[in-house]
Amino acid sequence: MITGTAAATLPISSSGELDPPFAAETYAAEALAADMDFWIVFDSRKTPRSEFDDWLESNRPSQVCRYGDEERGVGPVGWIAVRGVNYNPSSGDVCGLQESWEKLLASGRSVAFQTVKELALNHGVLSGKWLMHLDSGFKLDHAWECVARAVLDGKISTAKVSTHDPTAEERQVICVYNHNFTDESEVIRLDSAIRATGVKCSLSYKPDVYTYLGIYRKNRWNICPTIYESKFDLECVPRRSHIFNKITKLEPTTSAKSSQHLAELSSCSICMTRKGAL
């Protein structure tokens, strides 16, 4: 995950004015605002593990208000995040990426996944994340605890969860990161690590390059904002995810699925101890 508050670019018309907003631009603006607000972070590289349980209990995502509490003197909180001992922010030229994106839009060339992927490779913006959208409440808090503990144990590099907005219709989202969205086996290994925590809800995978370029759902280029989906099969023995590549319209390659199977076998004992579907 690349840190920072680089703004997503918005399309400019030939007259030099902003085109009428699409829903995606609203989502991008909301995400940027959350990024710029205060984050509640447990950084296991700096904070003793013994403090984690109290931190987790005090900062349950269903209880932390997005816009704070004026009466209690609490300001807005954008995200709650956990960083593992192996956390290493991805490097990349986000500003250069956005400049190239603006030139691409100005050129009138068509915009598709392969075009954006080429920009991401050229500028080294390769991180991405699995997303899980859950209603605020017990299941969200429990899923977040499972993922956060996996980060603490070094199974996952870093993760974050959105805070509760009582005025919004949107569900809260947990984001779990990896370094390279173009490495399918790495993406699938992260799915396995998430499933090993007991999480069984549907997941979708989004490259960070889409976030930086303002490519959210209902965007003007009709690009699907996620490139993989994962659904957990409770009927399969052993239980496992079915992952679908939205770009190729295929399941992962044999080699990638072999990596997934090995990871799931190694975590089988962990999976069996978890109860219920998140």
Image: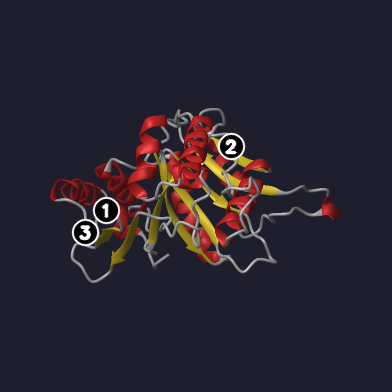
In terms of sequence position, does the residue under pointer 2 or pointer 1 come before the other? 2
Farthest bottom residue in view: 235
Q: Residue at x 45, y 29 (%)?
A: 92
Question: Is residue 132 found left or right of 181 in the rendered image?
Answer: right
In terms of sequence position, does the residue under pointer 1 or pointer 3 come before the other? 3
In terms of sequence position, does the residue under pointer 2 or pointer 3 come before the other? 2
Question: Is residue 87 found left or right of 47 in the rendered image?
Answer: left
Image quadrant in which you'd find residue 117: top left
Farthest front residue in view: 15
Q: Which residue is mark 1?
A: 269
Q: CA distance from mark 2 to mark 3?
A: 33 Å
State the residue in front, 62 or 203: 203
The amino acid pointed to by label 2 is Ala
Q: Residue at x 50, y 30 (%)?
A: 96
Q: CA distance from mark 1 to mark 3?
A: 29 Å
The nearer-to-camera label among 2 and 1 is: 2
Q: Residue at x 24, y 63 (%)?
A: 239
Mark 2 burial class by Cα count in 10 Å: few <14, some 14-19, many 20+:
some
Q: Which residue is mark 2?
A: 6
The amino acid pointed to by label 3 is Leu
Q: Is residue 208 visible?
A: no
Q: Which residue is mark 3?
A: 250
Question: Is residue 205 found left or right of 138 in the rendered image?
Answer: left
Image quadrant in which you'd find residue 203: bottom left
State the residue in front, 101 or 133: 101
Disc 2 on helix, strand or loop?
A: loop
Which quarter of the rendering shows the C terminus? bottom left
Give above or below for 96 relative to 30.
above
Say how the picture is coloured. secondary structure
